Image: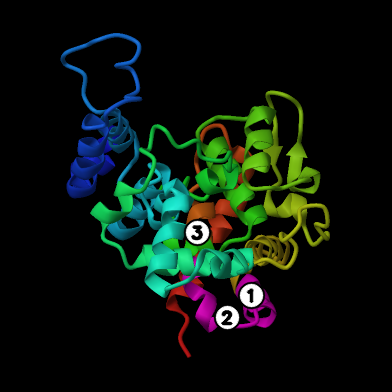
């Protein structure tokens, strides 16, 4: 990775699981992808090639546990991916034998009960046993679920666990602002984020929606107006932070008034301080970016409020 940052494959790699998946692919009697098109003696298992490419492209964060969860999810090698790849007929047979169900007794169970029995049995299996009744990753056509993938694209420097606590509308705004930091002002970028985060409308978040000069509103452009079209944004922690910055700028450059707004409007200010500092840190990093002079005042005030929050004590 550029800038000294390491990729996932440089920090960790699920060798054991990939070895088992590769062995399953290479020992398959038929339907091996690619070899059916033509013989190539040096061909590597497709699952290993995919994993290596993903591992090189995926940046490593400061949370290795979350990184491996994301990697396995994308590869359909996590618990839910394995279950979706599993042969349900084979699982049903195992459930019947395990619980001494007759064919008719099992048939009489409703779908939810069958799923519960399947998942309970599947969860107790080791990885080797699971993949023995699973499709290979390259055979499995994962349903198109943009939300799964967009859940994985965490902004640089953003804590992975805090990211999961944000609403889709908050994530849309933060990813959009990250794109602006990198000089991307294309409307297509916001349209793609809207689809990925399942945001049906976002016009009230935008200062400009022209094709190549599209950008989000700054705190002063939001002011204290209600944002009603982006579901989950109004009343969110990010909205309160933007309002606090606006108030602090408007009230004669008084960051303590922004802090007062946060403390009086957050249901649990003290439990929310990590999130507040994360959001303020992200916003203050817009300062002195050549293509974002409109964020300078807000970034400067975000920095002041960050210091107040960081030093605040009971």
* Circle 3 SS class: helix
Q: Which residues are magenta?
A: 257-277
Up-down relation of residue 69 to residue 140 (above or below) = below
Q: Is residue 194 left or right of residue 22?
A: right
Of the 4 image quadrants, the one containing the N terminus is top left
Query: Which badge, 1 or 2, is on the more N-terminal residue?
Result: 1
Foreground: disc 2 or disc 3: 3
Instruction: Look at the image and tell me whether residue 157 can be seen.
Output: no
Secondary structure mostly seen in magenta is: helix
| Residue 133 placement (x, y as % from top left) | 35, 48
Q: Residue at x 80, y 48 (%)?
A: 204
- Tell me the tag on residue 262: 1
Instruction: Measure the alpha-carbon separation of dots 3 and 1.
Output: 20 Å
Looking at the image, which is closer to me, 166 or 109? 109
Q: Residue at label 3? A: 163
**Residue 272 lies within the magenta run:** yes
Q: Earlier in the sequence, mark 3 or mark 1?
A: 3
The residue depicted at 50 percent of the width and 54 percent of the height is: 282
Identify residue for label 2.
269
Pick the front one: 149 or 44 = 44
């Amino acid at each position: 990775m550029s800038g000294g940052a390491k990729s996932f494959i440089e920090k960790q790699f699920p060798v054991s699981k990939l070895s088992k998946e590769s062995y399953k692919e290479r020992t398959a009697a038929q339907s091996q992808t690619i070899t059916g098109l033509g013989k190539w003696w040096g061909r590597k298992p497709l699952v290993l090639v995919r994993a290596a490419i993903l591992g090189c492209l995926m940046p490593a964060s400061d949370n290795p546990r979350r990184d491996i969860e994301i990697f396995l999810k994308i590869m359909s090698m996590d618990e839910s991916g394995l279950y979706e790849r599993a042969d349900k007929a084979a699982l049903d047979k195992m459930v019947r034998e395990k619980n001494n169900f007759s064919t008719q007794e099992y048939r009489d169970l409703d779908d939810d009960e069958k799923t519960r029995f399947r998942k309970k049995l599947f969860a107790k299996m080791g990885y080797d046993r699971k993949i023995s009744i699973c499709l290979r990753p390259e055979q499995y056509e994962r349903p198109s679920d943009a939300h799964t993938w967009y859940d994985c694209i965490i902004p640089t420097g953003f804590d992975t666990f805090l990211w999961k606590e944000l609403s889709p509308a908050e994530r849309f705004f933060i990813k959009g602002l990250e794109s602006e930091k990198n000089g991307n002002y294309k409307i297509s970028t916001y349209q793609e984020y809207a689809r990925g985060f399942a945001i049906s409308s976002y016009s009230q978040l935008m200062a400009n929606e022209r094709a190549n000069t599209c950008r989000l509103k700054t705190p002063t452009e939001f002011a204290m107006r209600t944002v009603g079209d982006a579901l989950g944004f109004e009343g969110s922690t990010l909205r309160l932070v933007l309002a606090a910055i606006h108030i602090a700028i408007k009230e004669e450059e008084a960051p303590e008034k922004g802090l007062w707004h946060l403390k009086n409007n957050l249901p649990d200010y003290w439990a929310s301080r990590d999130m507040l500092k994360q959001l303020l840190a992200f916003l203050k990093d817009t300062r002195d970016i050549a293509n974002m002079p409109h964020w300078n005042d807000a970034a400067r005030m975000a920095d002041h409020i960050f210091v107040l929050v960081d030093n605040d004590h009971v």
